[in-house]
Image: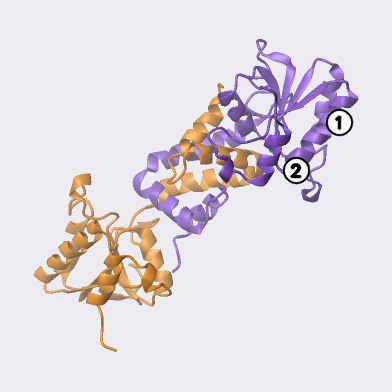
Chain colours: A purple, B orange
Amino acid sequence: MQAEPILHDLMQALRCLPGVGQKSAQRMVFHLLERDRQGAFKLAQRLAEAVDKIGHCKTCQTLTSSEVCVLCSDERRNHELLCVVETPTDVMAVESATSFKGVYFVLNGRLSPLDGLGPAEIGLDKLVDRLKIGEIKEIILATNPTVEGEATAHYISEMAKKHQVKATRIAHGVPFGGELEYIDSGTLSHAFSGRSEV
Amino acid sequence: MQAEPILHDLMQALRCLPGVGQKSAQRMVFHLLERDRQGAFKLAQRLAEAVDKIGHCKTCQTLTSSEVCVLCSDERRNHELLCVVETPTDVMAVESATSFKGVYFVLNGRLSPLDGLGPAEIGLDKLVDRLKIGEIKEIILATNPTVEGEATAHYISEMAKKHQVKATRIAHGVPFGGELEYIDSGTLSHAFSGRSEV
């Protein structure tokens, strides 16, 4: 069938969203045009606005509409404590789950030489500049516990050592509410080697 | 955390999409702004265009940018054969899977009195008008085999009978490639009662 070109184009455009294939895109188009035109209109506006106005914080690289994000420009936060995360959503996760009151540095990725992501691409030169200033006393490495995340954490900890800054890694182990029986072996071995006295 | 208002608004707007919750919306925002700004920009444009230009075909009620859709205005199709479906995506599914060369009528829903969807809301008065003209010789009922879909099919078949138009229902049974062992009992009992001579 020769689908309506406008509908076909919209379906294709929706597929740029992560996790959206052809079937979901079809369902979305129908839902939006049939049941929620106002929502679709609002979404179009919000998208255009975000693309236009959102850039990166020049201090921590997170997504923001101002030159320096709200967290970096907050005087009440502890600027001696720096948490390194992979993505802006990780910042949100840490903010909503913990009582961390330091500042962040967002890599927007992780070291992955095969994908062409070296230290410069994830902004580590910017991090070195901040280390040189000497304000930072501790770096908390909160990259994901994947192979690349671990490598990135290791690389940054070496950088920190060179500038006499303490580097710590968040704990990895059995998740709260999890059962030993169902935990993968890597996590369990981490939990044992990372045990602490009670 | 006080999330950037523009990002927060975009996340909320994305949640109007079916199947998108808070976590997926977060992931989408990050993906769009960090990895695919061009896709986001295009999506915004396409959405605005579709909301602006797409309406319903005045003959068959499907989504279209013209007054009468391409299928209804196609002279080569058999206008005596009318297939009744629930949604515009069903039209696409039938068009791509079958060799059906008649025309369609899209209910944009199904009879569901509890949700306030009566015959008028799904355009059945329009269908009666078309039956009265007398061009239609057969109605193929291709609503979904759910309780509401069956009720809708039954209602339309009664309408057709009143206007001396033949009404047929698409076959329901064991799907191609399916195994009897794993088929639900309703489908299997349908398959038996709908058996045909070979």
Please state the chain letter of the residue tagged with numbered disc 2 in the rendered image: A
Judge by depth and name the residue closer to the eye, A49 or A123: A123
Quadrant, the N terminus of chain B: top right
> Which mark is first along the chain, 1 or 2?
2
Tell me what residue is drawn at x 17 percent, y 54 percent. B119
Question: Which residue matches tag 1?
Answer: A158
How far apart, in angstroms, are the residues tagged by discs 2 and 1?
Answer: 15 Å
Q: Quadrant of residue B132?
A: bottom left
User: As displayed, is residue A86 above or below residue B150?
Assistant: above
Quadrant, the C terminus of chain B: bottom left
Horizontal side of A181 relative to A106 (left or right) equals left
Horizontal side of B141 relative to A19 (left or right) equals left
Which residue reaches farthest front? A198
Which residue reaches farthest right? A162
Q: Secondary structure at mark 2?
A: helix
Amino acid at pointer 2 = Glu
User: As displayed, is residue A68 above or below residue B113?
Assistant: above
Question: Which residue matches tag 2?
Answer: A148
Horizontal side of B109 relative to B28 (left or right) equals left
